[in-house]
Image: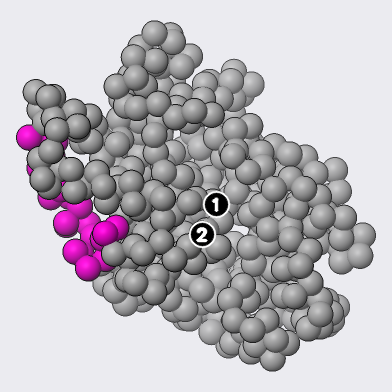
Amino acid sequence: MEKIDRRSFLKHIGAAGAGAALVATGCKSQTSGVKAGKPDSEGTMEYRTSGRGDKISLLGYGGMRFPTIDNVRGAELDQEQINHLVDYALEHGVNYFDTAPVYSGGKAEGALGRALARHPRDSYFVATKMSNFRGSHTFEEGLEMYQHSRSELQVDYIDYYLLHSLDGSRESFNTRFIENGLLDYLLAEREAGRIRNLGFSFHGSAEGFDYIMSLHEQYHWDFALVQLNYIDWNHSDECNASYLYSEMEKRGIKTVVMEPLLGGRLANVAGMVSSQMLERRPGSSVASWAFRFAGSHPNIMCVLSGMTYMEHLQDNLGTFTGFEPCTEEENEFLDGVAKAILQYPLINCTMCNYCLPCEFGVDIPSIFNHYNKCINEGLVPESSGDSDYRKLRRAFLKGYDKSVPSLRQASHCIGCMECIKKCPQKINIPTQLHRIDEYVEILKQQKEF
């Protein structure tokens, strides 16, 4: 779909009527416009049954974005706050916790393990991943990663284990898991009960997914983790989530959802879209719409959310306690939201941080996050002739310097292309960085444009 600039977009939605007049023009918290509070004590958490009979909370705790000391990006994880969040989640019915060896610079598994070890082992299910997409792909490397995960998580068995970030490439799959004997070992671990469920996470094309599905009769996937939200359901650039879901459903493979908010994009909306959502469901957050959409499909076993703050956890608990699936009319409404959002010139970054570290120190996710935030807030000057040009220019540049240290800004990208190989969203990262850098230079020099 062709992207249009912000001014054209605003004209587009103004003429398109209520169904399409849905634009993200403000960047707010997940609970924007809603007073976050404790979940209804009279309600109960929604649970789904796994293929092996586990009773899984529909809301799962994603461990990619744990809180850090003083909320500083890249700082040490705040173990005390993580413990508090995990305790509160368990107390209110959440029992599925997802992590990976690569999250938080390799520190997330240990932090989660320390928090969960304070609770009975049968009170939670833990999921982690074989994140061997970098390195030599030897059996020894994979074995060390698997054993390290169990040690960090302080468990004798892993409830849900995933082959991390498959893209459907036969060559990559064979190199990572077949030729080195690693998958045979993991299958034996499942047979022995040290892995209770074996699955995979996926980022790739429909053809690639078909290949992974063709292996089901041989390996008997118990579950899979896929990106699913009301934009990707029918409007994904790579592979529609509706197709992934249907292929798993007809094979009896349970679905776990990642990126229900697209890295926060579907929570940070305002303007006409948020007002319509709040009018339709007073007291419910904008984010709750995305979570309800994801959880409404019956084959969904769990919807992950990376809840950094207590207000996020409480808001999500309110959504999944006394859960109300989306109606057919609400799904049509959300499809209109998706079509409108896709016209907006945002960069499809979910801040997964897989592109990091950059050899040249560029903080790719923070650069894209600042740009998207300014687009949403209307802080991107379109022309030096705009009446509010000076105000917008200052806001953009001041926010850029505050969000991204000068030595980590887009100007330091040399176009080596290594980040493209790591990006699950298949973003042409150097092209986008160079575009942003050129725009920053125009603003700094106050050139006409």
Contact (Cβ within 8 Å) of mark 2 with mark 1: yes
Say few, some or many: other residues with alpha carbon within 10 Å of mark 2 (under 14 / 14 to 19 / 20 or more): some
The residue tagged 1 is 426
Residue 193 vertical placement versus 7 (above, below): below
The tag earlier along the polypeptide, 2 or 1, is: 2
User: In which quadrant of the rendered view does residue 366 lie?
Assistant: bottom left
Asked which quadrant contains residue 353, the reply is bottom left
Instruction: Label 1: state its secondary structure.
Output: loop
- Report the amino acid beneath label 1: Lys
In magenta, the rendered stretch is 390-411
Residue at (49% x, 28% y) in the render: 2
Rounded to the nearest angstrom, the CA distance separating label 2 from label 1 is 7 Å
Crowding at label 1, few (<14), some or many (≥20) Cα neighbours within 10 Å? some
Q: Could you tell me which residue is drawn at 66 percent across and 38 percent down?
A: 240
Q: Can residue 426 be seen in this view?
A: yes
Q: Where is residue 109 in the image (x, y as percent from the top left)?
A: 51, 77
How many numbered callouts? 2
Give the structural element (helix, strand or loop) at label 2: helix
Q: Tell which of 422 and 94 is nearer to you.
A: 422
- The dot on residue 420 is 2
- 271 sits to left or right of 295: left
Is residue 359 magenta-colored? Answer: no
- Along the line of sight, which residue is nearer the eye, 62 or 202? 202
Is 245 left or right of 59, judged from the image as shown?
Answer: right
Q: Is residue 291 shown left or right of residue 76? A: right
What residue lies at 75% left-to-right and 75% top-to-bottom? Answer: 175
Q: Within the image, what quadrant is residue 198 found in?
A: bottom right
What is the magenta segment's predominant secondary structure? helix
Q: Is residue 399 magenta?
A: yes
Can residue 330 be seen in this snapshot? no
What amino acid does circle 2 point to?
Ile
